[in-house]
């Protein structure tokens, strides 16, 4: 005799069979793939990255990318190391310092160079950069901030040893100026806006140190090894976003302003302080034989951080710059 609950058992078996994917449609790659989590801070130079996310371009190519916002960039790499995120936006000096500390990452795309976007802002009584001698300068020690201030001082006959360095994050410069703990500090918009509203003045900018600070897409080496096709899709999507932004500048700028937290009226001014890279620019940057190559730039940056004792030895540029995905993009 068949059990009375046979119809129920049959129903359960069929339900389990269907839910396991043996019947019906298979899950899409987006439903099964783990999101690639990229940390970013507020910076208009990441315009194409923001456009790609906002317009759904990553979804269109089937790669799930999740943007994770940080209030300042110094916490990025701790979360990369702990694998809370798979990569981050970061500067060329960040790449040099972090990889010297054996953080296994590679740069796969150059977003921009700062040509005025980074600023040393200070008290009104500082009439010229030469007046910075002996003053307290707020910067993030051991990062691109340190490199930028040193280069700016050098341009006016001073060195980092002629000032008193105070370790201050970019989003705290205005507050520390108000407290009187520093006389000047390195920051950028949107943080700069409030300082200028309080009556502080711009002393020098990265326009005076062109090519010094570049912003990159940096991915964990294990993610690159495990998911090369997804990384390639990300790069191809950034190419698409760059093309779209050039054809729809007002829309792209508005998207970047939203993510970069920059007032609409400041968009054009901020973007004038940036050189945003296209695919062609990236191919030159990642070509060791090009005069615009990042390789020599990373060597110079590594020498600086060795000199000031931040790192003992810099990693060779060819070990941290990965040109394969740019070569594979169209």
Image (cartoon, helix red, strand yellow):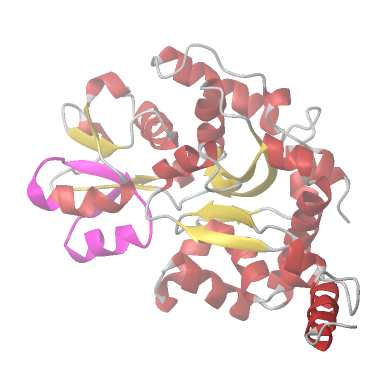
Residue drawn at (74%, 71%) of the image:
59
Q: Is residue 301 above or below residue 18?
A: above
**Residue placed most toward the observer, 280 or 77:** 77
Residue drawn at (74%, 32%) of the image:
291
Whole-percent x, y for residue 274 in the image = 55, 55
Quadrant where the image shows the N terminus:
bottom right
Residue drawn at (51%, 34%) of the image:
94
Whole-percent x, y for residue 145 in the image = 39, 37
Please say whether residue 57 is visible from this viewpoint. yes
**Residue placed most toward the observer, 323 or 4:** 4
- Along the horizontal axis of the image, is 49 left or right of 82? right
- Find out whether residue 71 is within the magenta segment: no
Whole-percent x, y for residue 169 in the image = 30, 44
- Along the horizontal axis of the image, is 162 left or right of 105? left
Residue drawn at (80%, 87%) of the image:
4
- Which quadrant of the structure image shows residue 252? bottom right
Q: Please state the extent of the stretch shown in magenta in the rendering.
A: 178-203
């Amino acid at each position: 005799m068949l059990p009375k609950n046979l119809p129920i058992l049959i129903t359960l078996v069929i339900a389990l069979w269907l839910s396991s994917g043996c019947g019906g449609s298979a899950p899409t790659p987006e439903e099964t793939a783990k999101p690639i989590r990229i940390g970013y801070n507020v910076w208009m130079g990441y315009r194409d990255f923001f456009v790609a996310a906002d317009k759904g371009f990553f979804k269109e190519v089937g790669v799930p990318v999740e943007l994770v916002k940080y209030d300042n960039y110094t916490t990025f790499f701790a979360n990369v190391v702990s694998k809370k995120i798979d990569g981050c936006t970061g500067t060329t000096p960040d790449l040099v310092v972090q990889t010297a500390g054996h953080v296994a990452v590679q740069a796969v795309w150059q977003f921009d160079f700062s040509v005025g976007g980074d600023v040393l802002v200070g008290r009104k009584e500082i009439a010229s950069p030469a007046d910075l001698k002996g003053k307290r300068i707020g910067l993030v020690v051991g990062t691109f901030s340190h490199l930028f201030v040193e280069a700016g001082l050098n341009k006016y006959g001073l060195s980092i040893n002629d000032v008193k360095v105070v370790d201050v994050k970019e989003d705290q410069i205005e507050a520390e100026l108000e407290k009187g703990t520093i006389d000047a500090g390195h920051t950028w918009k949107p943080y700069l806006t409030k300082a200028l509203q309080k009556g502080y003045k711009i002393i020098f900018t990265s326009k005076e140190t062109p090519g010094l600070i570049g912003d990159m897409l940096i991915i964990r080496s294990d993610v690159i090894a495990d998911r090369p096709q997804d990384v390639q899709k990300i790069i191809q999507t950034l190419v698409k976003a760059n093309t779209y932004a050039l054809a729809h500048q007002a829309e792209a700028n508005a998207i970047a302003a939203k993510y970069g937290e920059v007032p609409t009226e400041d968009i054009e001014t901020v973007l004038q302080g940036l050189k945003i890279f296209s695919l062609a620019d990236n191919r030159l940057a990642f070509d060791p034989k090009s005069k615009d190559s990042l390789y020599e730039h990373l060597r110079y940056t590594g020498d600086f951080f060795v000199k000031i004792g931040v790192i003992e030895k810099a990693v060779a540029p060819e070990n941290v710059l990965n040109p394969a995905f740019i070569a594979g993009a169209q």
